[in-house]
Amino acid sequence: MEQPSIRLEMNDEILKFLKGEFESSELNRLPESYGGGKIFATPLIGVAQAGDPIFQRYKEIIGPEHLTPLEMWLACGQDYNRVSSLSTISIVFPFDKQIRNESINPIESRRMIIPPEIYTIARNFGNEFKRATILKTIKFLNEKGYDATSGMLSDAYTIVLKGKFYTTWSERYIAMASGLGTLGLHEGLITELGSNIRLGSIITNAPLKFTPRKTQEPHANCLYFAKGTCKECAEKCPVNAITEKGYNKIKCNKYRMKIARKIIPPLRSKLKMETRRVNWKLKQDISIVGCELCQFGVKCTDNNPMASHHVDFFSF
Ligand code: SF4
Ligand code: SF4
């Protein structure tokens, strides 16, 4: 068993490596026609022990096909490791301040409200940077003599459409297990860098220090759940997918598809193509865009609004 200081050093080394990538990678840049600025600001990481019982509970909370870190490790073709020797590293990719500021005012037409073009481009281009960063971090760990893999980039990662709608590896829930934050009323993860973020993760047998979860309450960082105030995200959603009763995933996804149909055709030549699996079937050459109107110009866009409070009012 490695000394705790060795584990902490490894966390620091990974974060330092990631900060360098975020700073220098050309893939973390908007096209020149959109100003050429950074897509993501400085990252944050959190680490969970792969054997944490929370991962088993995710099968009930998210869906039965959601994999534990050990299941995903094996599905990625890695050799068997004792679960106690594995960890998940979650990475927060926070959108840059310029993108957050310029995305506050959506484009409103008679029929619908859509995100500003700069956000559509940033989110679409940001996916390539995310993938490249995960692969480079895996290589970084391999060069240090450790095995590492990515659930999101594996063939085992798929959207599951079986009555419910979920993925086999939820980056939000992995990040929550890794002590990076809790869910908001809008179901985004509210981290110390806000909820207007993207997430990625790696599973590895490198010795790492685990990040303690500050609370067992799954919505502790959200002002609505903690104090009964805010609800700004609900006001921002054009289709009332967020109400006091919670987040309506079906309504949200329906609108996200409507947005995609509206904004992809005129931007197709600019957008990067990606692949996606739905019910384990590969779909190639698709453009992926988002909505996230509920994440801009709200109390949790760029910070944890409950950071100065300590809440733990009911159990997860
Ligand atoms: S905008 Fe307010 S209510 Fe909505 S998730 Fe953020 S903190 Fe919670
Ligand atoms: S992503 Fe868009 S449709 Fe979904 S809840 Fe947020 S604002 Fe509403």
Image (cartoon, rainbow, N blue to C red):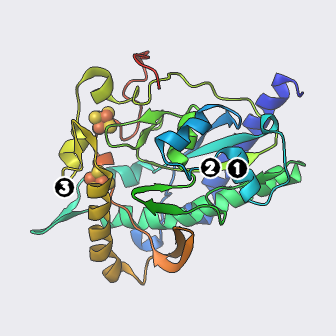
Task: For marks 3 and 1, give the CA distance.
Answer: 37 Å
Tell me where residue 1 appears, x and y as whole percent.
Answer: 90, 27
Q: Quadrant of residue 188?
A: top left
Task: For marks 2 and 1, give the CA distance.
Answer: 6 Å
Q: Is residue 235 above or below residue 102?
A: above
- Determine whether the residue tagged by mark 3 lies in a helix, strand or loop: loop
Under mark 3, the amino acid is Val
Give the class, few, some or many, for how many residues have Cα within 10 Å of label 1's Cα (few <14, many ≥20).
some
Determine whether, in the image, residue 92 is placed left or right of residue 197.
right
Residue named by callout 1: 71
Residue named by callout 3: 239
Sequence-earlier tag: 3 or 1: 1
Q: Give the foreground label among 3 and 1.
A: 1
Tell me where residue 255 appears, x and y as whole percent.
Answer: 26, 63
Under mark 2, the amino acid is Leu
Check mark 3 vs ligand 2: CB closer than 8 Å? yes or no: yes
